[in-house]
Each structure stands twice: as C-alpha cells, then as structure tokens.
Image (cartoon, grey):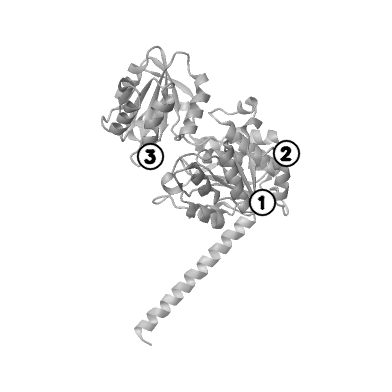
Amino acid sequence: MTRAAIALGLLVVIGAVLLFYWAMSVRGHQRRLRQLDVRVHVNGIRGKSTVTRLVGGVLREGGYVTVGKTTGSAARVIGPHGEETPIFRRGAANINEQIDIVAEHIRPDVEALVIECMAVRPLYQQYSQDYMVRSDVTIITNVREDHQEEMGETLEEIADSMAVTIPRGGVVITAEDRPYLRERLRKRAEERGSVLVYADPESVDDEDMRGFDYLQFKTNVAIGLTIARLCGVSRQAALEGMWKSVPDIGVVRLRSYDVRGKSVLWVPMFAANDRESVKLTFETLQAQFPPGATVIGILNNRRDRGRRAELFAHMVPDDLSGYLDHVVTFGAYEDTVTKTMVERGYGRDRIHRMGDTVQPTLDQILDKVADLIDGPSGVLVGMINIHTEQAELLIDHFQELRGAEHRNEIDESRDPRRAAIGVSRLRRAGAHQPRVAAPAEVTEEAGRLNV
C-alpha cells in the first residue's frame, strides 16, 4: 500500500469520526430541546436582555423549571433558582455558544428555556432559530434603527431581518407600537404558519410598575404578561416573578450623590442607545428630576460605534435640546460630534470635551460636573455606550460611594427573597405535558387581546 493511500485512508477515517461526532452532537442537542415544554427566543433591537430576564421570572414564578440566558451588557446564564452565572469567553462572542449553553444547562428536570438571540446578520439569526433554539415562541421586542450595516437601512428592512426568527407553526409576540411595522411582522408570521400577538402596554397599570426598584417600561412588562397568559400563569404570579427578577447590568437606577458639594442625581442610561428609547426614557424620567436642576448629558462614544456617535450628534440638537442644559463628550469622535451638534443649532458653549482629546482624571471630570451645575442640585445622564475610560472612572466612583449598599447582579440573584415559587418543584415526578398554547388556542387568545 502506498503512502498516499495510507494518508487518504486516515483522512477518510478522521472524516468519518468527525461526521459521527457531529451527528451525535446534533441528535443530543435536538433531544434536549424536545424535552422542554417551552422554548422562548428573544429578539428585537431594544430590551432583549431585560425581556429575557422578565420572561424567565414569569415562568419560574409560574412553576416552570426554567433556564435563561442573556447576551447583552454582561452575558449570563440564569439557573432554575434564579441564580446567575457569568459566561466567560475565549475570544469574541460566537452564536455556537447557544449550543454549549443547552448542553451544559438543560438537565432532564428543566422544562423551559428563555434565550436571547445573539445574532445580528439575518442569515445567522435564521440559523440560530431553525437549528439552535427551535423556539415555540419568539419575542420581537420592537423595531428600531440600529445595526443598519447588517439588517437594512429602513425600519421595514430591519423588521424583515428579525422576522426570520419567527417559528414555524408557533407564536410571535411583539410590543412594537407602530401598526404598519406590526402588520409587516404579522404577514411574516402568517407566511410561517404562526400567529402574532401584540403585547399592549395599555394592559399594564401604574400599580403594576411599583414593584420595580429600577427604571422599567410598560412595553417589557406587557410582554411578560402576554407570555403568562399563553403559558397558564396567573397575572399576579407573573408580576411577582418580574418584580423578583434581577435587572441587567447597566439598568437605570436613580441615586443621588454628593459631587463637590452639589447633589447630583446619577442616571446611568448607557443601555438606551437609539432615538425612540432615549426619548421615551427622558419623557419617563423628567418627572423625577429635581425642580430647577441643571441636566447634563454624557455622550459616551466608543470608537467601534461610529454610527451611534453620529446618531446622537443629531439627536441632541433635534430631540434632546429641551432636556439637556449641557453636554459632556467622553471617548472618541469629539471633533466630529461637536461640529455636527453646533451646525444643527446646539450652542458651542453648552458642549464640553472630557474624552480622548483631553484624557481627564476622575477629579477633573467631577470638577467639571460641579462647575456646570447652576444651583444646589443637578442631573447627570450617561448615554450611548458603557465602556470608555472616562465612563468607567465615573461608574466605579459612584459604586464606591454606595459602599456596602452596592451589590452586583450576581449577588442579587442569590438573594433568597428573590427565589421563585417554582423552585420547590425542581424535581417534579412523572411526565409533564407541554403547556404553551397551540396556534389555534393562541388565535382565540389573540382575539380576546384585541390584536
């Protein structure tokens, strides 16, 4: 036998082994997915991580043994007790991570999986749905302008890009408030034999929101309540589960701190980085700003987020000028952002550079904030992105001021007071039947929900 024939034979054997391993891995992954009563794939432009956490809380409180997985500001696996485990990655994030999560965390007693979509490109989104998650229910939180390079320049194109994660013969839930975009999603659902259900924020009362100790939106809560109706969870249990759920890192929690003798309300709004979300947040928060307080906005621009920098350079003069007395620039693009804001009518005397062109110390940043506040109190709003050198200095400083009061989300997730009722049912005896409403049942439910 020649050397070439031996080499070819080895390649054939290695290929066969790899093919067998791949086939067994696929079969094992599909078996784990099939054992689940509920599979929820959370997509959308804004609020994916928050909604993943809320829906997981709804299902846990409703008695489902539930695993959740978020991908946002800090990737986490949320176990059946609500406890959180960080996901440590070697290198850049990869959508194949979803398969690893299922393999590691979907044990025989787990009944529900709530997983945030990692993919941005439509092809990868479709692959994630069709092969990795195979959800019964897909949530598309909303349609906003972001990731246009991959998803399309128009809102209609972006809606179509996300619609590839709609299941076949299942349910899609959305809180998108624009009827023409909702109708577009409905048509895409019908093409897949699925039903669209609108999560109407009007179904959420002000009293329902009082259980949250951080800024939350009725649209997100409406999605949680819609899931509850479809899965047979009572409204009160759903609310309890959402109230107990640990918020995502970077969530807006309003706290006041002393900055050089001035009382400063710190609003870390870094996770809101599209026009609609930011405007809605300002409208929601304005009533909580101290009367007469100077409002300072931080434009925190990462070098790898140039489109967001451009977006906010337009938003400040066009949409936020009435809210913001001053703007402080952090990070990159200070020259172009300043030029754009001035050209669009925002006064140059209201723009203050404290980013990469200045490289300030923490003391210089705090001095600047105090100097800009005309009176005893002010509001400092962080926007666009979390990670720049200047923003991290400020975030760490305010966390240190909180001292023992500060607990990260990992510690909070292990607080016994947040444990769900369903924890006591982790070892259910006997077989259990799927409890997500079938499409025909959902159609009847949709009629009652006025969708």
Quarter of the rendering containing residue 262: top left
Residue 113, horizontal then vertical, whole percent: 60, 48
Q: Estimate the spatial distance between the alpha carbons at disc 2 and disc 1, rounded to whole Å.
A: 24 Å
Residue 420, horizontal then vertical, whole percent: 64, 38
The residue nearer to you, when weighing 41 against 214, is 41
Q: Which residue is mark 3?
A: 307
Lower position in the chain sequence, tag 2 or tag 3: 3
Tag 3 secondary structure:
helix
Q: Tell which tag, 3 or 1, sits nearer the viewer.
A: 3
Is residue 431 visible in the rendered structure shown here?
yes
Q: Which residue is mark 2?
A: 448
Of the 4 image quadrants, the one containing the C terminus is top right
Q: Estimate the spatial distance between the alpha carbons at disc 2 and disc 3, rounded to whole Å.
A: 41 Å
Q: Which amino acid type is marked by label 3?
A: Arg
Q: Estimate the spatial distance between the alpha carbons at disc 3 and disc 1, rounded to whole Å.
A: 40 Å
Furthest-bottom residue in this view: 1
Q: Which amino acid type is marked by label 1?
A: Asp
Q: Tell which tag, 2 or 1, sits nearer the viewer.
A: 2
